[in-house]
């Protein structure tokens, strides 16, 4: 299939700004007639890239005069940003969408748009088109920038619309954004994936790799830092391929160069990035991290499996030995680095012996944290067709064993932090414990600490007093009054 990567010209973005303006007039008239503002709700499933895309949807809705609410039942416009990486995420989004039928009955003027990775697949588009008649429009990942136009059409009596270019990708600069937080920001550097790991749907729903121009990225970072942002997370399905799709960058400017340039921006902030593919995470990148003080000592390096046989069947293009070599280099150059990973249990054909190899690699690697996933067959990917699928029982059992092992390692690693002092960026009050504030170290470790003053969005210094498997408990040593 020929796939297109389009850089949306600014005149098309201007057209969309025009639609936003027109919708705004309609929305303000409606609000005046009924004596209350029109409200929108954005629901997000899936990864950080989706979170970042949803901040653009919120920005668009605000520009159109809608006011944000967090419950769909209060909304006049619902936008759902879906995920397709595992079946569970799709079923959840479909079940939630099913509930909008009642909302539409109660409020016939309600507009429902479903977007993102799930609806970038033909079969899911067909499902929604045929079985969810109260959904007003669908927008695949490459159609997000046209959401203002779709809403305008529907508000002015247009038909239901299904806008998905399967497997396509685009780059749209200049859309409004409403960021969820002031102190931390997602900044996308590239999007799409060329790797075609055999289990993964992402290359089919987000299209080929495409990088943003460095000037646009650096400008976005300067803007958020000037607005008080202290933590930037650079996003991309494989950030290590940054620039490889831009002929003028090849051999001259890559992800390491970008990190170097970001490091030179003035301001008190740290930078993380995700996700890296081990085959493309080069020593030069690690050297750059070691050199640049603003780049956080945190590396998310998805392993997926510790068995070379399974890695081959996954089309990962590295071996466990190569992976461990990379890890050793990281720890040599950046001794305090926190390393996290993704692991899939129960990939087709995974024997008990293969799984033992994963456990043994996890014991050697001693990750700070892992994100483990039970293999979920994704229709359209090669692995979904493999004949040797693993039973749900075995997948679940392996998943539990992996978690038990990692819980122990995470706990031991956290215990070694007791007595140490960290600079922590405070995220706000802890959701589980009303009296405690919560934040993250530069290595991304979760820290809870009691505090009398609201420190949200500020750096604080915390001395660690106790450890849990997934969090550190500490005491405030001082708050950074410079901010
Ligand atoms: N089943 C289970 N986990 C998956 N992932 C991607 N595709 C699948 C799948 N089909 C996991 C990988 C990836 C993370 C984002 O999601 O571990 O790194
Ligand atoms: Fe999926 Fe592999 Fe691409 Fe990651 S690198 S998005 S796992 S295909």
Image (cartoon, helix red, strand yellow):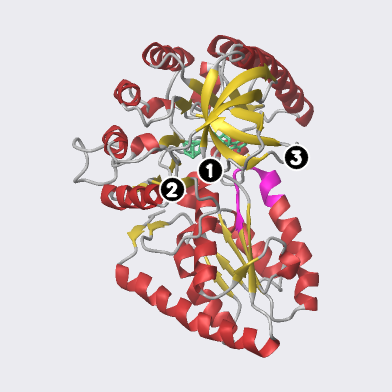
Residue at mark 3: C-beta within 8 A of ligand 1: no
Q: Is residue 2 rendered magenta in the image?
A: no
User: What residue lies at 56% left-to-right and 85% top-to-bottom?
Assistant: 26
Quick one: 265 or 80, which is closer to the camera? 265
| Rendered view: 217 above or below 455 | below
Q: Are marks 2 and 1 in contact (CB under 8 Å)?
A: yes
Question: Disc 3 on helix, strand or loop?
Answer: loop
Q: Which residue is mark 3?
A: 434
Report, in whole angstroms, how far the alpha carbon at label 3 lies from the one at label 2: 26 Å
Q: Which residue is mark 1?
A: 457
Report, in whole angstroms, how far the alpha carbon at label 3 lies from the one at label 1: 17 Å
Regarding residue 475, the answer to whether it shows in the image is yes
User: What residue lies at 57% left-to-right and 61% top-to-bottom?
Assistant: 115
Question: Disc 1 on helix, strand or loop?
Answer: loop
Nearest to N terminus: mark 2 or mark 1: 2
Report, in whole angstroms, how far the alpha carbon at label 2 lies from the one at label 1: 9 Å
Which residues are drawn in magenta? 81-91
Crowding at label 2, few (<14), some or many (≥20) Cα neighbours within 10 Å? some
Please give left or right for residue 412 compared with residue 458 in the image. right
Crowding at label 3, few (<14), some or many (≥20) Cα neighbours within 10 Å? few
């Amino acid at each position: 299939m020929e796939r297109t990567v389009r850089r949306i010209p600014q005149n098309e973005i201007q057209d969309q700004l025009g639609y936003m303006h027109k919708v705004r007039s309609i929305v303000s008239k409606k609000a005046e007639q009924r004596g209350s503002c029109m409200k929108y709700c954005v629901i997000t499933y899936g990864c950080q890239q989706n979170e970042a895309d949803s901040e653009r949807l919120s920005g668009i809705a605000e520009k159109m005069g809608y006011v944000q609410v967090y419950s769909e039942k209060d909304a006049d416009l619902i936008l759902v940003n879906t995920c397709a990486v595992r079946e569970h995420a799709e079923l959840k989004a479909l079940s939630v969408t099913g509930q909008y039928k009642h909302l539409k009955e109660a409020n016939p003027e309600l507009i429902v748009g479903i977007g993102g990775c799930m609806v970038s697949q033909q079969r899911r588009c067909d499902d929604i088109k045929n079985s969810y008649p109260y959904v007003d429009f669908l927008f695949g990942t490459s159609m997000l920038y046209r959401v203002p136009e779709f809403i305008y059409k529907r508000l002015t009596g247009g038909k239901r619309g299904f806008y998905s270019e399967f497997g396509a990708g685009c780059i749209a600069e200049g859309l409004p954004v409403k960021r969820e937080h002031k102190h931390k920001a997602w900044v996308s550097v590239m999007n799409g994936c060329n790797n075609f790991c055999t289990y993964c749907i992402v290359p089919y729903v987000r299209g080929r790799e495409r990088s943003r121009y460095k000037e646009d990225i650096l400008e976005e970072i300067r803007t958020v830092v000037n607005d008080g942002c202290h933590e930037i997370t650079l996003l991309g399905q494989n950030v290590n391929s940054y620039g490889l799709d831009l002929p003028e960058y090849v051999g001259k400017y890559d992800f390491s160069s970008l990190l170097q340039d970001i490091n030179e921006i003035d301001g008190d902030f740290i930078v993380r990035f995700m996700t890296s593919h081990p085959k493309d995470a080069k020593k030069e990148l690690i050297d750059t991290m070691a050199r640049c003080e603003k780049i956080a000592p945190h590396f998310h390096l998805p392993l997926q499996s510790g068995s070379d046989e399974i890695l081959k069947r996954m089309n990962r293009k590295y071996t466990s030995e190569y992976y461990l070599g990379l890890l050793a280099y990281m720890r040599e150059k950046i001794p305090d680095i926190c390393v996290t990973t993704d692991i899939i249990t129960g990939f087709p054909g995974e024997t008990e012996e293969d799984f033992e190899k994963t456990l043994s690699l996890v014991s050697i690697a001693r990750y700070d944290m892992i994100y483990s996933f039970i293999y979920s067959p994704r229709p359209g990917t090669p692995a979904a067709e493999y004949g040797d699928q693993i039973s749900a029982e075995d997948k679940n059992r392996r998943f539990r064993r992996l978690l038990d092992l990692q819980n122990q390692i995470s706990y031991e690693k956290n215990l070694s932090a007791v007595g140490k002092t960290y600079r922590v960026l405070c995220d706000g009050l802890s959701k589980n414990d009303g009296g405690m504030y919560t934040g993250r170290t530069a290595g991304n470790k979760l820290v809870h600490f009691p505090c009398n003053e609201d420190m949200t969005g500020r750096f604080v210094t915390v001395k660690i007093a106790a450890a849990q498997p997934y969090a550190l408990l500490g005491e405030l040593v001082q708050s950074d009054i410079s901010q």
